[in-house]
Image (cartoon, rainbow, N blue to C red):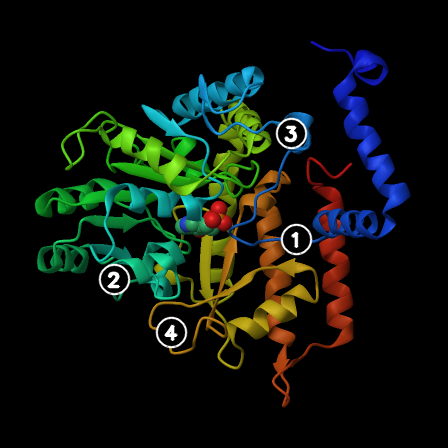
Amino acid sequence: MVSLETLTDTNHLSRYLGQGIETLAREDPDVYRLLEREHERQCESLSLVASSGGTDASVLAVAGASVVNVTAEGYPGRRYHAGCRNVDELERLAVERAKAVFGARYVNVQPHCASFANHTVMQALLDPGETILGMALDQGGHLTHGAQANLSGKLFKVHHYGLDDDGLIDYRQLSELAQAHRPRLIVCGTTSYTRVIDFDRIREIADGVGAYVLADVTHIAGLVAAGLHPSPIDAAHFTTTCTFKQLYGPRGGLIMMGRDADALGDDGNRTLSQRIQSAVFPLMQGSPEVHTIAAKARALARLAEPSFRALAGRIRTCANALAAALTDRGYDVVGGGTDNHIVLFRVPERLTGVLAERALESCDILVNKNKIPGDTRGATVASGVRLGSNTVALRGMGPAEMVRCVELIDTVLANTLPSQDGGLHLPDLVREHVTAQVRGLCRDFPLPYAA
Ligand SMILES: *Cc1c(COP(=O)(O)O)cnc(C)c1O
C-alpha cells in the first residue's frame, strides 16, 4: 500500500499527472476551462443515456500516464520495438483479467473500439462479397452489423432480421433467413433491446447452416460480467464489447472467445483465435494504445470486485423501477418492461422522440430519442425515448430515486408543446422547477469522481 504522503512527496507519476493539470490551467486556459465545464456538466446533469457509463479517477489516471509514449507494435514478447518490458506486463495483465472476468479462453485487448472489434472479426473470417446476417439498424442493430451506411454493409452481402410484433427478437425470421441465404456470419447483440438475448438459440441456428456467430455485447457487457445476463462467451464463436459503456472503463474494445478459441477455422490451418490475433494486428491496426490497454486492465480489476456485482444489481433494479414508474404514469413501455439496463417508451402523441429529448435536455435530464417497433418516423425524429440506468446506478441511486426521475420526466413531457417553427415550448416555471430538482438529486447522489 502506498501512503498518500509517499505519493505527493516522491511519486514521480503523481507529480507528473498533477503538474500536467497545473500547466494546462496556466498555459491553455481555453482547453482547461472547457474540460472543467464538461466535468461540471457531468456532475450536475442526470444522465439516463443508455450508452453512458462513468470512468473512475484511477482509470483516468492510468489512461493519462506516460506509458502512452511507448510504441509497441505486435504482442507481448513479440514486439517490433525495444522498451516494451512494462507494457508487455500491462497487456498480459489486461488479458488475464478479462479472461477471468468473462470466463474466456482467448482475449485480445488491442481493438481501439467496439466498431473496430466487429470489423476485425469480419475481416478475419470473410472475403468481400460474402454473406452476413445482422439485426437491422432500425430494429436495434448497430451500424457495424451490416448497415448500408457502414463499411460492413458495403463490403458484404447483408440480410437483416428484426423484431416480431411483441418487440422480441424474431428468432423464427432469423432462422428462415439463415436457411435461405446461408450466411458465413450471424451478428447478434443490440443497442436498444430490453430483453434477454438467447445466444444458445442463435448458435443452434448458425450451426444448422454452418455460420459463425459474433455476439456484440457492448450494451450489456457489465451484466454479463456480473452473471446477470446469460454469457455468449461459449455460445458465440466471437464476443466483442466496448469498454466504456457498462464496463465503466476507457474508450476501447475487446474481442473474446470461449470454447471455439482453439477450433480450426474453415481455411483448415489456423485456429480461430490465431486468425483474430493476426486480424487485429497487422491486418487492421498498427501500434496498440498501450495507455488504454493499461486502463482496461485497471477497469477490469474493478469488475472483479464484489462492489461491481452490487452495482450491476442496482443497474437492473433501477431499470425495473424506471419501467414500472413509467407504466404507472400511463406510458407505453416497449416489451412491457426490461431485463437489462434499457427502458424504451413511446412519447405522448403530440410529441416526437427528438422534441422529448430536447425538452428534457433543457432541464439537464439526458436521454436519447429512439425508434420503437413499428415506428413510422425516421431515426432522427423517432416516436420513442430510450433510457438507461448505468450512470444513475453508479451514483448510488435506487428505486425510490427512479420514481422521482420518472416524475420529473413526466412533468417535462406533460408540459411540453411543439411550437409552429418545429421547436418546442416548455414554460420557464416548469423548467426551473425540474432543473432545481435535478440539481438536488445530483448533489445527493454525486458521481464517485465528482469531488
Ligand atoms: C456503442 C456500440 C458500439 C460501438 O462502440 P465504439 O466503441 O464506439 O465503436 C458497437 N456495438 C454496439 C452494440 C454498441 O452499442
For this orientation, the residue located farthest to the right is 26
Q: Secondary structure at mark 2?
A: strand
Q: Viewer-proximal residue, 225 or 443?
A: 225
In the image, 18: left or right of 418?
Answer: right
Q: Viewer-proximal residue, 391 or 85?
A: 85
Q: Viewer-proximal residue, 104 or 31?
A: 31
Residue 51: x percent and y percent?
52, 50
Q: Which residue is mark 2?
A: 160
- Which of the two discs, 1 and 2, sits closer to the camera? 2
N-term mark: 4 or 2: 2
N-term mark: 3 or 2: 3
Amino acid identity at mark 1 = Leu
- Is disc 3's CB within 8 Å of ligand 1? no
Callouts 4 and 2 close, C-beta under 8 Å? no
Distance from the alpha carbon under mark 4 to that under mark 2:
17 Å
Residue 29: x percent and y percent?
87, 49
Distance from the alpha carbon under mark 4 to that under mark 3:
48 Å
Q: Classify 10 Å Cα crowding around label 1: few (below 14), some (14-19), many (20 and above).
A: many
| Residue at left offset 18%, top offset 34% | 265
| Residue at left offset 46%, top offset 19% | 92
Is residue 320 in sight in this rendering? Answer: no
Q: Which residue is mark 3?
A: 69
Callouts 4 and 3 close, C-beta under 8 Å? no
Q: Quadrant of the N terminus?
A: top right
Is residue 310 in sight in this rendering? Answer: yes
Amino acid identity at mark 2 = His
